[in-house]
Amino acid sequence: MGLSQIIAEVQGDPVTWAWVLGSSALYLIMCAVIWAGEQKKARLKREAAAGATPWLVVYASQTGQAEEIATATLKRLTDGGQVVRIIDMADLKLSDLEAAQHVLCVASTTGDGDAPDSVLGFEAKVMSDGAVLSHLDYAVLALGDKSYADFCAFGRKVHDWLRASGAKPYFEVIEVDDLDPAALNRWYENLSDLGAKSEAFDPKAAYGAWQLKARDCLNPDSEASKLYRVVLEPESGDLPDWQAGDLAEIMMADGHVRDYSLASLPTHGAVELYVREVIKDDGSRGLGSGLLTHDLGVDETVLLRTKSHKNFHTPDGDGPLLLIAAGSGLAGLNAHIDARVSAGRKANWVIYGERHPIRDGALCKALTARVQAGELSDLTLCFSRPETGERIYVQNAIAASQERIRAYLADNGAVMVCGGLSMGQGVDKALRTIMGDGWADQALADGRYRRDLY
């Protein structure tokens, strides 16, 4: 039947006529979308062949995960024939974005919806002002954890800022909860449509089997949640290399992961962790802590890898180091103390908080032994549930030592903080009261004030 016959058939039927017009319009729209996609792919191939540098991969990373995914993104684009440059958002300038044509950003959220420490300067100096980026195409992968209220907040903020600056998104921001493999797969599949090499994504490829060798409860008589020392060794016998501040990443059976501060160095011959047992309101155990403190038997294996955490590596320089932690947060400081002592740097002042001096005192005794061995220059212990006397938290101890801390840090000193988020926020407020916002902001930017909060 020809077009004239179709028109003749439907002229007297408005419903059928509307259906024909609607179907034709939908067909034309689909053709236009496909044509535009093919034109974009062709343009990207021409740019790559001409030796242009159209792709910029940017990462904003707190624990190193965003940097790893950005590096994998870079590799897939490069293998697909694209010319790509990768850059830490901490080093990113507005001129870099103005010179780019296509930007892919992998952004983590930390704290209460905050930017990673290293990119606070970019957020304050660049994202707070308007920009004209209408020439730019972009996409954002936002990393976060749904257990926090402001899930993926910083990634969404980057996405919204780029769009408000006139840039055009390839697709809506992809939000990743706790490194969810399905969400990461969507990112890599979308990259394939943009000219990246298509590769199967195997989330387990980087992990090895590690055996539980020892597990000791450090506070069996405590009224608080139980704290365990957990020791693991690689089943293969080949110990990877890592440095103070790095993380052990455990993969659960469902593909999600949990990060734990490494309390040991490779010279110890094993991975040592401090794991706090988590009991939920319904009586069930936390996924990661339940596995490590209860479910995993001695000599049974778990998938684990060590992961670089450069934002919590030991600050440069020979100046004094103030180390602040509470509870299991001491794990993130132990290796730093060991590394500093090995390097002959013994100007190490630890401020450590626990609940009770006896029932929760095992790690306090270990720190006291370090003082006696000459490994620590000073130790301040504070307890939130003593038998008698005032409840003292680490931020209280900081406030009570204002003059000493000001003098200590003025001598090219640095600060490292490890522990719970609320503790870290209290410590930050106390330090800013003593040293000033200017000092704290600059120390964060320079890597002289480093935090590992959870």
Image (spheres, grey):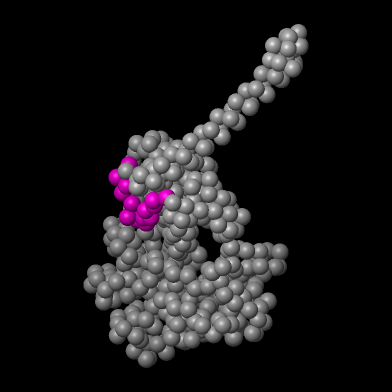
Observer-nearest of 378 and 275: 275
Q: Which residues are magenta?
A: 82-98
Q: Is residue 435 above or below residue 367?
A: above
- The number of numbered discs placed on residues in the rendered structure image is 0
- Residue 283 image point, x, y percent: 70, 68
- In the picture, the quarter occupied by the N terminus is top right
Specify whether residue 211 is painted magenta: no
Residue 211, how many percent across, how many down?
60, 82
* Residue 379 visible in the shown view: no
Name the residue at the left extreme.
411
Residue extending farthest to the front is 2
Residue 168 in sight in this render: yes
User: Residue at the location (52% across, 42% down)?
Assistant: 171
- In the image, residue 86 lies in the stretch drawn in magenta: yes
Describe residue 260's horizontal placement relative to residue 302 as left or right.
left
Q: Observer-nearest residue: 125 or 103?
A: 103
Instruction: Tell which of 263 and 378 is nearer to you.
Output: 263
Query: Does residue 102 sit above or below 269 in this rendering?
Result: above
Residue in the picture at 44% in, 72% down: 246
- Give the quadrant of residue 15: top right
Q: Is residue 283 left or right of residue 155?
A: right
Q: Position of residue 295 (x, y in %)?
A: 68, 76
Q: Is residue 253 above or below residue 47?
A: below
Q: Residue at x 69, y 11 (%)?
A: 4
